[in-house]
Image (cartoon, rainbow, N blue to C red):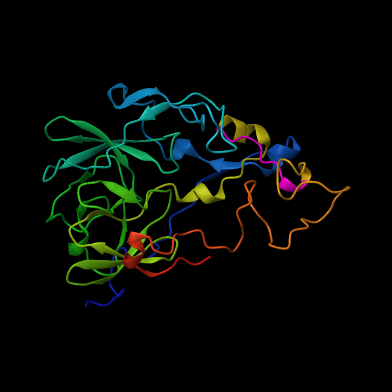
Amino acid sequence: MQNADFSGSPLFFFYFLPIIMKHYNPTSPARRQMESVEWKKILTGVGPTKSLVSGFYRARARNGDGRITTRHKGGGAKRLWREVDFLYNKKDMPARIMSLKYDPNRTSLIALVQYRDGAKRYVLASRDMNVGSEIIISESAPLEVGNRMPIGKIPVGMMIFNIELYPGHGAQMVRSAGVGAIVLAQEQSYTLVQLPSKEVRKIRVENWASIGSLSNHEHGLVTGGNAGRSRHRGIRPTVRGSVMNPVDHPHGGGEGRTQRGRRRGPATPWGKPARGVRTRRAKKQSSKFIISRRKK
């Protein structure tokens, strides 16, 4: 097994970039707390490409019967769904970065790329991805940011994202803003990868991954400021269970502000134990690929 040697790796762990944040004048209590990303200094494209968008996507959080399946979601501003390419099926064909754009449906930025045959695709933008540069999806791709290759051929110590979990299924892991996984070791059939949650997992060497880490690393510094901004994003209010009635929540009831009053500890609205209780199935098939669990 090839062990991790992080010396000399150009993409070792985290490389620091200037943080581009926008601060607002305190004209109101909400405005005083508000912080956002200075998009004008990052984005290079205006509006989505019409051939790569589809109908409106709304956070309804209901199933086909109209029943709520996910709480605290609903409403929000109308948005077009951007068709992001996670399969990366145009192999061995260079693609040029045409523009960097904002996607309201995800936290990271997206890049409009054009392949040599004229086809255009949206892909997740990585850090240090510049307009005019080229990326390629190939088994012999150079070790440069944005390129994609089998994970078994990526050197130990490099950061990766858009990781394929099953062959041919496309990128499924490490797709959020500013995150990246680290290649820890290479074995005969598996690659050991440390995910952003600090979980160490085995991944088949024939699965594909992109080199680098994702864009918009300032996302964690954004402060909404007021409740209206959350409603624009389709996030509805969260009501505490302790202020409900007993018929609505296990924590409800009592005179005034009372404690939960449960011997078995806190619970979900449906009575399932919460906070500190493992919810993963003990005999889940993929557990054999997890070397160490994530850190809390």
Mainly helix, strand or loop, the magenta region?
Answer: loop
Q: Is residue 106 visible?
A: yes
What is the quadrant of residue 141 in the picture? bottom left
Q: Is residue 201 visible?
A: no
Asked whether, in this view, residue 274 is left or right of residue 37, the answer is right
- The magenta segment: 233-242
Q: Nearer the viewer, residue 257 or 220?
A: 257
Q: Nearer the viewer, residue 185 or 14?
A: 185
Above or below, comparing residue 181 to residue 137 in the picture: below
Is residue 241 within the magenta segment?
Answer: yes
Above or below, comparing residue 67 to residue 18 in the picture: above
Above or below, comparing residue 194 to residue 255 in the picture: below
Q: Nearer the viewer, residue 167 or 278?
A: 278
Locate residue 187, reporting x and y percent. 21, 72
Is residue 290 within the magenta segment?
Answer: no
Q: Which residue is painted at 29% across and 27% down in the image?
A: 52
Asked whether, in this view, residue 115 is left or right of residue 110, the answer is left
Image quarter where the N terminus lies is: bottom left
Residue sitting farthest toward the right = 255
Q: Which residue is painted at 56% across and 34% down in the image?
A: 73
Locate residue 222, reporting x and y percent. 56, 45
Locate residue 233, reporting x and y percent. 55, 33
What is the quadrant of residue 16 in the picture? bottom left
Locate residue 27, reporting x and y percent. 73, 35
